[in-house]
Image: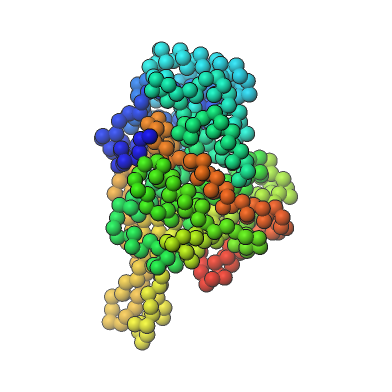
């Protein structure tokens, strides 16, 4: 399997790496072709890959969905969505569409109407793909992207295998990308892994977590392992605690039905938040080979100390938003959202304190928090170092020393900052906290990037480093399962318990206050 060292410095979306080559030709089949993910992220990402010259001329995109439409209608719909997305500041940040690039992609699209539960869909798909092998030069390589509801993951994979579409021979590859949620708890994740591993090899499965497509998340490895400066500090001797925040200013929007059975913990923690945790806390891998990296990530998640009984309730906090004001706009309470039960007990906020039981991190608490409709959109990893001894400053105007922080800003305003104390100019000793700040936008030209470009390209070149292996997914669920169990057996807190546009429930502050700590401000 290709490792990431092959093209370590490439930034797919910007085209800054002259040496990166187009992916091998393939037919990419997207199930859920009429859905939101396809329009909002996957197709814009493919377009960005065309711009960056990363798709082979033998590339072809086949859309499969239940809706009856022709290839022309599908293409036209996507053309309109792309055009509408321009300049709207969403995930697709482009301010214009390059017509030559779009035409290049649009000319390579076809649509197939079909029901995922019907074997004839896969037979017809097989015929279509065989035809494309002859006419479009796809090389017989297929990438199946499951942008569909999770209840269809197992069935679709089984049908693909039964239709002989997953068989790899004569150098042809067949891969499948599986979106989240991968399972709903530990038992269902294990069952899904078992089901798909009956018919596929692990190397054919790309379980996607789009946080790993973010440059800033990938950069955590560069920060830690390409610099001699930080590694000696990166342990319990120097670090007091770590805070990982993913705070959102969106509510559940039109996803009430999905969110009702998911909630903030399942939606964000075993996947996205644990990816941030793993990147921050993993041991150095012996190489950038996919299995070496994923092995180290699995190890650290497996080292999370299991929450036991009442401790699962004590060390976790759930919240649900009430009506409030977010970014100056009044918004309704979660229980008033479409497709949401007016007495819903689903959490839209989650925080916890966890410990990693290994030599590097023993005794260092990791605090995680994530929520919808918070004060500010902000994702960061904040590492707090131990305080310097105060003794020297007795007899000065300095009343207390401020701690040092290293802040990895994932989004927005991507960058890294180091906060430390400096003497203020003047005759007496007074200190201020100052910051050394690296901002991505100052150093690098950031081209439009949905975050899916690298991930799609990696699937095509067979680099699974940024994808979850079966054990990674199961380790994530294993760690949160005691909390899910404890919640299922305990009374729900009085919801709603935080105002939209705020910092989350008071209990989240108390979680840190118990040990004399406080969350970094979201202001
Ligand atoms: C998704 C969750 O996986 O990630 C959403 O289902 C969440 O609820 C989103 O809003 C956050 O991703 P990003 O890239 O917008 O921070």
In this rendering, does residue 90 appear at all? Answer: no
Residue 408 horizontal/vertical position (percent): 40, 55
Query: Where 495 sits versus 153, above or below?
Result: below
Residue 451 horizontal/vertical position (percent): 43, 40
Q: Determine which quarter of the picture holds residue 230.
A: bottom left
| Side of 268 relative to 333 (left or right) | left
- Which residue shows up at 34% across the image and 59% down it? 231
- For the image, the number of numbered tags is 0
Q: Nearer the viewer, residue 259 or 359?
A: 359
Q: Determine which quarter of the picture holds residue 180.
A: top right
Query: Where 287 sits versus 486, above or below?
Result: above
Residue occupying the far bottom of the picture = 395
Query: Where 409 sits versus 158, above or below?
Result: below
Q: Nearer the viewer, residue 433 or 182?
A: 182
Q: Nearer the viewer, residue 85 or 152?
A: 152
- Which residue shows up at 47% across the image and 51% down it? 299
Q: Determine which quarter of the picture holds residue 224.
A: bottom left
- Which residue shows up at 59% across the image and 41% down it? 189
| Visual colour scheme | rainbow
In this rendering, does residue 507 appear at all? Answer: yes
| Side of 518 relative to 442 (left or right) | right
Residue 34 horizontal/vertical position (percent): 55, 27
Q: Nearer the viewer, residue 33 or 249?
A: 33
Where does the N terminus fall, quadrant-wise?
top left
Residue 503 horizontal/vertical position (percent): 56, 59
């Amino acid at each position: 399997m290709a490792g990431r060292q092959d093209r370590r410095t490439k930034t797919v979306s910007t085209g800054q790496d002259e040496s990166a080559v187009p992916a091998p030709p393939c037919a990419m089949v997207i199930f859920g072709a009429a859905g939101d993910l396809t329009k909002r992220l996957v197709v814009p990402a493919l377009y960005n890959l065309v711009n960056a010259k990363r798709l082979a001329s033998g590339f072809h995109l086949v859309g499969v969905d239940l809706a009856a439409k022709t290839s022309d209608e599908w293409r036209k719909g996507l053309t309109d969505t792309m055009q509408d997305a321009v300049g709207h500041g969403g995930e697709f940040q482009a301010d214009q569409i390059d017509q030559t690039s779009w035409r290049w992609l649009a000319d390579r699209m076809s649509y197939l109407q079909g029901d995922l539960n019907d074997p004839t869909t896969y037979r017809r798909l097989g015929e279509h793909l065989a035809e494309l092998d002859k006419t479009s030069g796809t090389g017989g390589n297929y990438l199946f992207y499951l942008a569909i509801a999770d209840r269809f993951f197992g069935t679709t994979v089984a049908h693909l295998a039964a239709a002989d579409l997953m068989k790899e021979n004569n150098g042809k590859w067949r891969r499948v990308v599986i979106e989240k949620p991968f399972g709903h708890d530990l038992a269902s994740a294990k069952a899904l892994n078992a089901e798909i591993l009956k018919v596929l090899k692990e190397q054919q499965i790309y379980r996607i977590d789009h946080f790993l497509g973010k440059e800033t998340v990938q950069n955590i490895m560069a920060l830690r392992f390409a610099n001699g400066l930080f590694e000696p500090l990166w342990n319990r001797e120097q670090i007091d605690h770590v805070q990982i925040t993913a705070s959102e200013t969106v509510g559940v929007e039109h996803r009430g039905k999905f969110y009702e059975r998911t909630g903030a913990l399942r939606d964000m923690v075993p996947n996205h938040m644990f990816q941030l945790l793993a990147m921050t806390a993993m041991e150095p891998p012996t190489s950038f080979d996919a299995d070496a990296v994923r092995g180290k990530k699995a190890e650290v998640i497996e080292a999370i100390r299991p929450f036991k009984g009442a401790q699962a309730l004590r060390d976790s906090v759930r919240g649900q938003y009430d009506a409030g004001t977010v970014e100056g706009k009044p918004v309704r309470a979660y229980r008033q959202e479409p497709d949401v039960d007016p007495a819903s007990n689903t959490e839209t906020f989650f925080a916890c304190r966890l410990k990693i039981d290994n030599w590097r991190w023993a005794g260092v608490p990791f605090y995680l928090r994530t929520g919808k409709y918070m004060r500010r959109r902000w994702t960061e990893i904040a590492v707090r170092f131990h305080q310097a001894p105060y003794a020297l400053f007795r007899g000065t105007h300095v009343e207390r020393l401020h701690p040092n922080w290293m802040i990895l800003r994932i989004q927005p305003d991507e960058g890294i900052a180091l906060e430390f104390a400096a003497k203020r100019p003047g005759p007496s000793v007074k200190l201020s906290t100052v910051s050394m700040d690296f901002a991505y936008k100052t150093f690098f030209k950031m081209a439009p990037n949905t975050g899916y470009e690298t991930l799609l390209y990696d699937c095509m070149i067979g680099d699974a480093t940024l994808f979850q292996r079966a054990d990674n997914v199961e380790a994530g669920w294993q760690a949160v399962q005691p909390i899910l169990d404890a919640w299922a057996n305990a009374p729900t807190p009085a919801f709603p318990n935080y105002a939209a546009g705020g910092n989350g429930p008071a209990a989240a502050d108390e979680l840190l206050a118990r040990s004399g700590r406080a969350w970094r401000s979201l202001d």
